[in-house]
């Protein structure tokens, strides 16, 4: 069967190749789920892997099948798969797999202390940009038929879901935490989904991002009942004075200096969630004394988040269901840029590289119809 793959470490090596069709027997103890891939979302991670910035092939192979944002339909299941997953069920598979630490053993592989990660389509495990895959049922999450058009957004939703879930989890220490205002930094896919999750929890939302209007993403923020402000027209300090104090802030910009501005704007008993992975060696001056004092006296928290746990996938499904009820049709507007078929992998990379207006680029692997 066909798959999109790279040779890790070789820039621009993305290609179409034939790989063996998987079998339920690849998974032990009758827990296998064989899935027909319908759609796969792609993002900067896929672009960076093709640029040989990171990524590693599974042992025994010199290639890595890419793609970590899956959406598919079950073809067959093993005898020991839960009854919630049956042929015809729409499903999404999670990305990270357990390594050697205790966290993987308790279903929190996203908290691993291992230096080496096992991630589908990213590192040491083949991904989902192929016709079919087989996976252990514990890493497969069912979606209702009502999400068949937007289910490919579940994996990126879990990034926002985990960050905001953990902000609430951390603040259980307060016994009573009733946040009112959230500020999302960045208006890309993750920023928009974080705004959605925050609005679904009833928070007032401000999205602070670089682009000026006219800008589709700004319109989408306002359709949620949020407020969009361009950083070209106001500083974050000014936004905080007008729209804050912010109880919850979520950074999805990829621009690390903004984190320290956010730390100054964060309200008392607030949580600042960092979800951007930034490389490089950028350095900035910060108001270290003021930030330190405000965090100590204001009982503030700054926390990093990466990947997502099984519970985040389950709650992410509920968030998508809730979003479709509260904001009908909103999620579909994020699916801006379809690419038809695995054969068009070069177009996929071009869209990721050149199309600055794209919110979510995704590959239509086998269409999105029912029937397994």
Image (cartoon, helix red, strand yellow):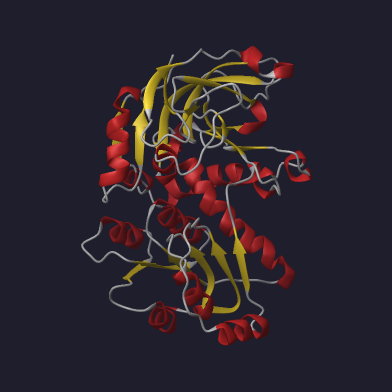
Left or right position of 113 against 22: right
Left or right position of 226 against 202: left
Where residue 61 sits: x, y (%)? Answer: 55, 22
Q: Nearer the viewer, residue 48 or 94?
A: 48
Vertically, is 54 above or below 175?
above
Q: Is residue 175 visible?
A: no
Left or right position of 54 against 207: right
Q: Nearer the viewer, residue 151 or 24?
A: 24
- Where residue 4 sits, quadrant-wise, is top left
Vertically, is 148 above or below 157?
above
Where residue 158 sits: x, y (%)? Answer: 54, 47
Where residue 128 sits: x, y (%)? Answer: 48, 28
Residue at the left extreme, as displayed: 214
Q: How many marks?
A: 0
Q: Is residue 134 visible?
A: yes
Q: Nearer the viewer, residue 287 or 26?
A: 287
Where residue 180 sits: x, y (%)? Answer: 53, 72
- Where residue 131 sits, quadrant-wise, is top left
Q: Quadrant of the N terminus?
A: top left
Left or right position of 195 against 214: right
Vertically, is 326 above or below 63?
below
Identity of the residue drawn at 65% across and 46% down? 110
Identity of the residue drawn at 49% across and 25% down? 63
Identity of the residue drawn at 64% across and 16% down? 26
């Amino acid at each position: 069967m066909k798959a999109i793959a790279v040779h890790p470490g070789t820039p621009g090596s993305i290609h179409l190749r034939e790989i063996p069709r998987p079998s339920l027997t690849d998974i032990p103890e009758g827990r296998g789920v064989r899935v027909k891939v319908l759609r796969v979302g792609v993002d900067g991670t896929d672009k960076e892997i093709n640029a040989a910035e990171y990524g590693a092939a599974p042992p025994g192979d010199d290639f890595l099948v890419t793609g970590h944002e899956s959406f598919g339909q079950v073809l067959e299941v093993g005898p020991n798969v839960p009854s919630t997953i049956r042929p015809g069920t729409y499903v999404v598979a999670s990305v990270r797999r357990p390594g050697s630490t205790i966290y993987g053993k308790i279903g929190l592989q996203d908290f691993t202390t291992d230096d080496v990660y096992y991630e589908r389509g990213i590192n040491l495990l083949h991904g989902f940009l192929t016709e079919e895959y087989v996976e252990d049922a514990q890493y497969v999450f069912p979606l209702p038929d009502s999400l068949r058009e937007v289910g490919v957004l579940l994996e990126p939703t879990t990034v926002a879901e985990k960050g905001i879930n953990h902000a609430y989890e951390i603040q259980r220490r307060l016994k009573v935490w009733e946040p009112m205002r959230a500020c999302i930094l960045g208006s890309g896919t993750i920023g928009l989904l974080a705004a959605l999750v925050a609005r679904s929890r009833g928070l007032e939302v401000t999205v602070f991002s670089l682009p000026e209007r006219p800008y589709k993403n700004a319109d989408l923020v306002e359709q949620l009942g949020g407020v969009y402000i361009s950083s070209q027209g106001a500083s974050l300090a000014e936004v905080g004075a007008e729209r804050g104090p912010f109880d919850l802030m979520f950074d999805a910009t990829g621009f690390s200096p903004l984190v320290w501005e956010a730390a100054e704007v964060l309200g008392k008993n607030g949580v600042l969630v960092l979800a951007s992975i930034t490389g490089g060696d950028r350095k900035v001056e910060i108001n270290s004394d003021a930030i330190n004092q405000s965090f100590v006296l204001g009982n503030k928290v700054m926390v990093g988040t990466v990947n997502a746990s099984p519970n985040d996938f389950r709650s992410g499904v509920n968030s998508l269901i809730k979003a479709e009820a509260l904001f009908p049709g909103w999620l579909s507007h994020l699916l801006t840029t379809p690419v038809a078929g695995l054969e068009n992998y070069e177009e996929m990379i071009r869209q990721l590289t050149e199309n600055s207006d794209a919110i979510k680029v995704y590959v239509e692997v086998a269409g999105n119809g029912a029937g397994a």
